[in-house]
Image (cartoon, rainbow, N blue to C red):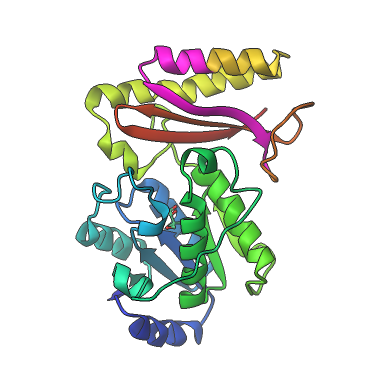
């Protein structure tokens, strides 16, 4: 697996790879875990060549967020990707992605509003902007994203449709189901921030979500089930809740009536760490 850090080298390598088969892109910010590797494996099973990008995108971090602290472990990530059979690692510097004079931002309305968009102003503008650039840089036939960031996936799909980004197939932007630890916690690079005690407490989040979903399936009122869920999360040791919401899985519109097609979304903070999760209703 080669590593390239300049656009010029990326273009040369991807032109060559594309000539001999389908090219998949797995965009990441590194600090790879089993969730990312699942994306890479899925991509390897569907495309001849897999390009993985590792870029901690400054534009998607707010002023008080963890840009500087975000885990960076390129050598280890490289070994993991090599073992999975990825073809190319695209690891640009911030200056390569946003050179002096860079001035363009992509803003996707609607699906970006609410949920993480409300708590992290500008976050999805940063995501949409960098993902659009990654699509243009790599020009993949398909791209793979984790469903843990369900809203992010919705934003990227909306952007690709709205900007007529060209892919050979309609379902080129693929979502891959959340990969969970043995105790149910959704895998995330940010789990590395948790102390041993916080890590133990964090498992209560998906467990409480499952209980809420079971209560809803038995006919509980949405407001009652969500209140109970919030109370369970705080009792388990979380410090605060950013949101606990039911939204339409496709449009992300808030749910006011019947729950068909809706999904449960949660973001909560433990210590300085913000964890998100989402699950379908049963
Ligand atoms: O999900 C992520 O890791 C990032 O938001 C992404 C899609 C790589 C864009 O920086």
Task: Name above or below for residue 261 compared with residue 259.
Answer: below
Give the residue at x 32% y 43%: 64
Question: Which of 223 and 202 lies nearest the eye of the viewer?
Answer: 223
Q: Quadrant of residue 172?
A: bottom right
Question: Which of 224 and 182 lies nearest the eye of the viewer?
Answer: 224
Question: Can residue 272 be seen in the rendering of this structure?
Answer: yes
Q: List x then y, in percent, for residue 178.
A: 49, 42
Find the magenta span and give its range.
230-249
The total of numbered circles placed on residues is 0
Q: Quadrant of the N terminus?
A: bottom left
Give the residue at x 66% y 29%: 281
In the image: residue 75, left or right of residue 228: left
Q: List x then y, in percent, for residue 279.
A: 58, 33
- Residue 247 in magenta stretch: yes
Question: Which of 16 and 128 lies nearest the eye of the viewer?
Answer: 128
Q: List x then y, in percent, for residue 43.
A: 49, 62
Q: Quadrant of the C terminus?
A: top right
Give the residue at x 33% y 41%: 190
Question: Which of 78 and 165 lies nearest the eye of the viewer?
Answer: 165
- Residue 248 in magenta stretch: yes
In the image: residue 149, left or right of residue 216: left
């Amino acid at each position: 697996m080669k590593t390239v850090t300049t656009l010029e080298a990326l273009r040369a390598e991807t032109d060559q790879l594309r000539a001999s088969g389908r090219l998949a892109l797995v965009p990441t910010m590194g600090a790879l875990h089993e969730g990312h590797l699942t994306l890479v494996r899925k991509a390897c099973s569907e495309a001849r060549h897999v390009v993985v990008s590792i870029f901690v995108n400054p534009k998607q971090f707010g002023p008080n967020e963890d840009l500087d602290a975000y885990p960076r472990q390129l050598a280890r990530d490289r070994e993991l990707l090599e073992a999975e059979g990825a073809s190319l690692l695209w690891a640009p510097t911030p200056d390569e992605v946003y050179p002096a004079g860079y001035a363009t931002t992509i803003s996707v309305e609607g699906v970006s509003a609410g949920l993480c968009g409300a708590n992290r102003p500008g976050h999805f503008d940063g995501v949409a902007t960098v993902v659009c650039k990654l699509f243009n840089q790599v020009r993949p036939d398909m791209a793979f994203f984790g469903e843990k960031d369900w809203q992010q996936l919705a934003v990227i799909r909306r952007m690709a449709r709205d900007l007529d980004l060209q892919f050979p197939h309609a379902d080129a932007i693929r979502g891959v189901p959340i990969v969970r630890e043995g105790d149910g916690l959704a895998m995330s690079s940010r789990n590395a921030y948790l102390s041993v005690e916080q890590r133990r407490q964090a498992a209560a989040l998906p467990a409480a979500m499952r209980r809420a979903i079971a209560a809803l399936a038995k006919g509980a009122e949405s407001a009652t089930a969500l209140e109970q869920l919030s109370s369970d999360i705080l009792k388990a040791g979380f410090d605060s809740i950013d949101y606990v919401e039911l939204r339409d899985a496709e449009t992300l519109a808030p749910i006011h009536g019947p729950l068909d097609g809706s999904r449960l979304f949660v973001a909560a903070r433990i210590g300085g760490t913000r964890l998100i999760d989402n699950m379908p209703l049963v």
